[in-house]
Image (cartoon, rainbow, N blue to C red):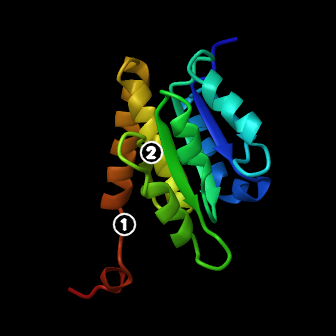
Amino acid sequence: MAEVQVGVIMGSNSDWDTMQHAVEILQGFGVRFEARVVSAHRMPDDMFAYAETAAERGLQAIIAGAGGAAHLPGMVAAKTPVPVLGVPVASRHLQGVDSLHSIVQMPKGVPVATFAIGAAGAANAALFAVALLSNNDPALRQKLIDFRARQTEAARGMTLPVNEAGAA
């Protein structure tokens, strides 16, 4: 079996509602991935082992979703040279702004690419991972180009209610 290319990790299975959007994108492009819970707070030794072995296991990117204190993306980035793409998961009280600040405020020298809060961020993190992988995969690059062309055509085909009613 071919090596997994992208890790999709989250701090809890309650993050799945957000992170499933990353998985759907990866599946749509045929990117090999693994998805698992790796909690920074409840299983730190497992988190460190995951990060420390990521490169040797062939991962080329890690999409890490976390809510609240959102330490997972930053702690994983601190322990691996593999690019980490952080997805803030909406939290109950602060709607994910706390998660966004936790992920985006990494200290100089330990980067985490940070995306929007929620489903859009998860999908965009996966699309970013696809773009990274496509640098060395012409077939995947063409799939990405085709995906973007379909998005353009869908946008061009959009109508507004005022135009449908015949107003100028």
The image shows residue 143 at horizontal and vertical percentages of 42, 31
Q: Residue at x 33, y 86 (%)?
A: 162
Taking 26 as reference, is 16 left or right? right
Which of the numbered marks, if any, corresponds to residue 148?
Answer: none
- Which is more foreground, mark 1 or mark 2? 2
Label 1 sits on a secondary structure element that is loop
Q: Is 142 or 99 nearer to us in this picture? A: 99
> Gap in Å between the C-alphas at discs 1 and 2?
35 Å
The image shows residue 155 at horizontal and vertical percentages of 34, 60
- Identified by mark 2, the residue type is Val
Taking 20 as reference, is 136 left or right? left
Q: Is 2 or 155 nearer to us in this picture? A: 2
Look at the image and tell me in which quarter the C terminus lies. Answer: bottom left
Which of the numbered marks, if any, corresponds to residue 112?
Answer: 2
Decide: few, some or many residues near mark 1? Use Cα within 10 Å; few <14, some 14-19, many ≥20. Answer: few
Q: Is 126 or 143 nearer to us in this picture? A: 126
The residue at which mark 1 appears reads as: 158
- Identified by mark 1, the residue type is Met
